[in-house]
């Protein structure tokens, strides 16, 4: 519970800070608006001036190479089966797309040096690299090729050509790799065949040496003659050929069982067996598809009788093609059965030629080792041929490493500049810069902004806050809420003076145009309306203005009285306002300060103090000339008029110092020309002035506390009254 006051205080301070910030924005709204408009219009102009760019995109599907070489010996490995490309692989494809080889092919095929006038080959290559952007679609094997160009047709053509050039390059590379793989496979087989032949010769030399007849695993005793050796060799080759044919047929049958769709048809057509209907049926199907395409191009729909008959015929041929594949498979099985029969007969015939020297041959270590090496090499060759046969078939089937999924289209709307984005950024930046400049200017602004500024730097109170654009009260009719500000000033003067006899007050300002004279006239009017005999003295002998408020002739006045033997009755004039008198400045002298700093001026002040309830002395700006300082030393009190947000704080301190240096006393400050309706610090004045405004401009006083009478040849006299009769507690 003890923390509640602290929390309330913190919340209150935060609220005050928020109000201060809002007030800064309100005060500097012109700067904010101007900055915002400048930056926003700049962004709009830049958006309009920037060249428009159109974008076209080609979508590709990228597969790994279907041919991989054994990194150890360069032999062909298994074809890739569609594994997802790695990140490194995709990045490598980006390099291929952006390579000079691909780009140069695009330049040549589109003839960009002619299409883009003023560009040579190197410049065209550089521009292609600048407008090209490649990107992988996340978690897929798809690549986007994007082209941005000022011409939408060029963007589409370039994107399409890059995709096709990249596809052609990959296809050519794949064919080259397939050729290299086939050559590697053939080289492997030839190398193994040579090895088998060497092993066979070495083994047969040992067979001849030991005198044993050998026919593929069959042993016989006795020495062999030339004819018998030839028979054995022929039988051996027959058995080897039969086994190789058997392996080939088994592999072909397996391919017919595992392959599907177009790959199955391509493989079946490639067998080229006598009596096979696959090539004929496939040619008919292709011809049917072309005819249907031609009819469709001529405008015939799918439900047209001719189209329906062609489709039925095509489906029938497709079924016949499938049946032909089945027949082909059965034919291969028949051939395989015949080969198995032949192989069995060969083996049976060889077994019949056994010899008694088998045991002897088996005891020969050289014979056993040579026979084992030969049979091992032969078995490896058979396995290699069987394996490589499937590889050769797979390599001969065409593959597409790159598939163009979507062709680029010609864009109708530009993608750059993005008008909404640019204008939004311009608005945001303009607003941010405007607010920043507003707060920066507020930071640099050292003028008087608040009551706290006055009280902090001058250590004197603010007597009144005068609203902005206040007119001359005595020229207004009816109700005037602005008059209440001057009534507050009148009351605060009374409560802030220490001596009731101090009724001579000069009103000064630091510079011209701060509303000093208007403040004096309106204060005098309010005091006169309150029943106090009030005298206004225009002591601004540089640029007098008080006579203009009442349309009074300024030819005779203060200077005439100070320099001649005129009486006060000759220079003090009665204004149209009751109880309000005026002493004009008179003819302007050459030495104003000298006239004001005279004994006669001091005597004048003392004389009028006795005759009037209140004397208000107008003076020139105190920081401009010395006249104001002289007047401050002659009168009792000094009021400083400060225009809101005009006079710097250090200048305000100099005004106070100028008054105090000559022995004057600053009773307080009038903060003038305050926009009380928009400034949150002073908004309460507006409601108060309106609410408490009187029903008429005349104070509701039954009888004035004093009455001045002016007669020819006599001095003004005052009828004294008691302080209790004074309005607002005033007693002059």
Image (spheres, rainbow, N blue to C red):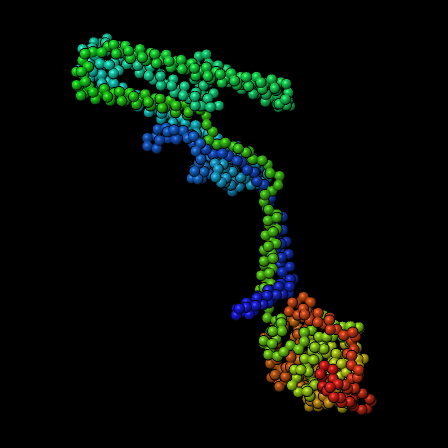
Residue 363 in the image, given as x and y percentages of width and height:
17, 18
- Asked if residue 517 can be seen in this view, the reply is no
Residue 521 in the image, given as x and y percentages of width and height:
74, 78
- Asked if residue 692 can be seen in this view, the reply is yes
Q: Quadrant of the C terminus?
A: bottom right
Indicate the quadrant where residue 584 lies: bottom right
Q: Is residue 359 left or right of residue 435?
A: left
Q: Is residue 50 left or right of residue 262?
A: right
Nearest the eye: 138 or 419:
138
Question: Which residue is pictured at 78% across the width and 72% down the height?
Answer: 479
Nearest the eye: 80 or 683:
683
Q: Is residue 488 above or below residue 339?
A: below
Which residue is outermost to the front?
Answer: 1
Residue 494 in the image, given as x and y percentages of width and height:
68, 82
Residue 468 in the image, given as x and y percentages of width and height:
70, 70
Q: Is residue 544 left or right of residue 281?
A: right
Which residue is outermost to the top?
Answer: 227
């Amino acid at each position: 519970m003890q923390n509640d006051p602290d929390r309330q205080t913190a919340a209150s301070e935060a609220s005050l800070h928020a109000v201060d910030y809002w007030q800064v924005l309100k005060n500097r709204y012109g700067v904010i608006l101007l900055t915002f408009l400048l930056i926003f219009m700049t962004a709009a102009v830049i958006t309009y001036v920037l060249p428009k760019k159109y974008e076209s995109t080609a979508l590709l599907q990228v597969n790994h190479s279907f041919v991989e070489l054994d990194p150890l010996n360069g032999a062909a490995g298994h074809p890739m089966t569609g594994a997802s490309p790695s990140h490194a692989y995709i990045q490598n494809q980006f390099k291929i797309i952006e390579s000079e080889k691909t780009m140069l092919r695009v330049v040549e095929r589109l003839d960009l040096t002619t299409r883009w006038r003023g560009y040579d080959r190197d410049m065209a290559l550089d521009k292609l690299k600048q407008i090209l952007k490649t990107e992988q679609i996340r978690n897929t094997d798809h690549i986007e090729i994007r082209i941005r160009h000022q011409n939408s047709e060029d963007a589409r053509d370039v994107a399409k050509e890059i995709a096709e050039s990249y596809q052609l390059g990959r296809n050519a590379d794949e064919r080259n790799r397939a050729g290299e793989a086939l050559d590697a496979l053939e080289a492997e087989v030839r190398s193994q065949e040579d090895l088998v032949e060497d092993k066979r010769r070495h083994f047969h030399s040992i067979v001849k040496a030991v005198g044993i007849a050998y026919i593929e695993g069959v042993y016989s005793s006795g020495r062999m003659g030339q004819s018998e050796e030839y028979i054995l060799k022929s039988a051996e080759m027959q058995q080897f050929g039969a086994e190789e044919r058997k392996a080939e047929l088994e592999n072909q049958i397996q391919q017919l069982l595992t392959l599907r769709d177009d790959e199955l048809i391509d493989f079946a057509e490639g067998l080229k067996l006598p009596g096979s209907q696959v090539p004929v049926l496939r040619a008919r199907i292709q011809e049917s598809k072309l005819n249907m395409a031609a009819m469709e191009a001529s405008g015939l729909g799918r439900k047209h009788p001719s189209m329906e008959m062609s489709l039925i015929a095509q489906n029938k041929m497709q079924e016949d093609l499938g049946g032909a594949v089945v027949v082909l498979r059965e034919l291969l099985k028949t051939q395989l059965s015949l080969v198995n029969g032949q192989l069995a007969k060969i083996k049976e015939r060889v077994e019949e030629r056994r010899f008694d020297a088998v045991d002897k041959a088996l005891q020969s270590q050289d014979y056993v080792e040579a026979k084992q090496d030969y049979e091992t090499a032969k078995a490896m060759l058979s396995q290699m041929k069987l394996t490589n046969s499937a590889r050769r078939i797979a390599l001969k089937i065409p593959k597409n490493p790159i598939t163009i999924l979507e062709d680029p289209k010609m864009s109708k709307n530009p993608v750059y500049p993005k008008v909404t984005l640019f204008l939004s950024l311009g608005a945001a930046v303009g607003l941010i810069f405007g607010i920043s400049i507003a707060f920066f200017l507020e930071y640099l602004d050292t003028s008087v902004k608040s009551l706290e500024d006055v009280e902090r730097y001058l250590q004197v109170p603010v007597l009144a806050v005068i609203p902005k654009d206040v007119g001359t009260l005595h020229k207004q009719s009816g109700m005037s809420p602005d008059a209440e500000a001057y009534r507050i000033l009148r009351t605060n003067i009374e409560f802030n003076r220490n001596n009731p006899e101090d009724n001579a007050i000069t009103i000064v300002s630091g510079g011209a145009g701060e509303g000093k004279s208007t403040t004096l006239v309106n204060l005098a009017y309010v005091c006169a309306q309150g029943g106090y005999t009030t005298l206004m003295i225009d002591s601004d002998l540089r640029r007098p203005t008080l006579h203009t408020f009442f349309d009074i002739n300024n030819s005779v006045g203060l200077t005439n009285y100070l320099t001649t033997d005129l009486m006060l009755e000759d220079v003090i004039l009665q204004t149209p306002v009751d109880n309000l008198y005026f002493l004009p400045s008179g003819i302007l002298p050459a030495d104003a300060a000298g006239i004001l700093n005279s004994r006669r001026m001091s005597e004048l002040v003392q004389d009028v103090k006795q005759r009037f309830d209140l004397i208000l002395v107008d003076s020139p700006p105190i920081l401009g000339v010395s006249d104001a300082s002289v007047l401050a030393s002659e009168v009792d009190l000094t009021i400083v008029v400060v225009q809101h947000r005009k006079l710097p704080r250090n200048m305000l301190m100099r005004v106070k110092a100028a008054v105090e240096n000559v022995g004057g006393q600053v009773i307080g400050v009038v903060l003038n020309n305050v926009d009380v309706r928009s400034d949150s610090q002073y908004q309460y004045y507006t409601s108060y002035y309106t609410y408490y405004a009187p029903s008429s401009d005349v104070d509701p006083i039954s009888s004035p506390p004093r009455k001045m009478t002016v007669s020819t040849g006599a001095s003004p006299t005052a009828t004294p009254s008691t302080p209790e009769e004074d309005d607002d507690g005033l007693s002059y």
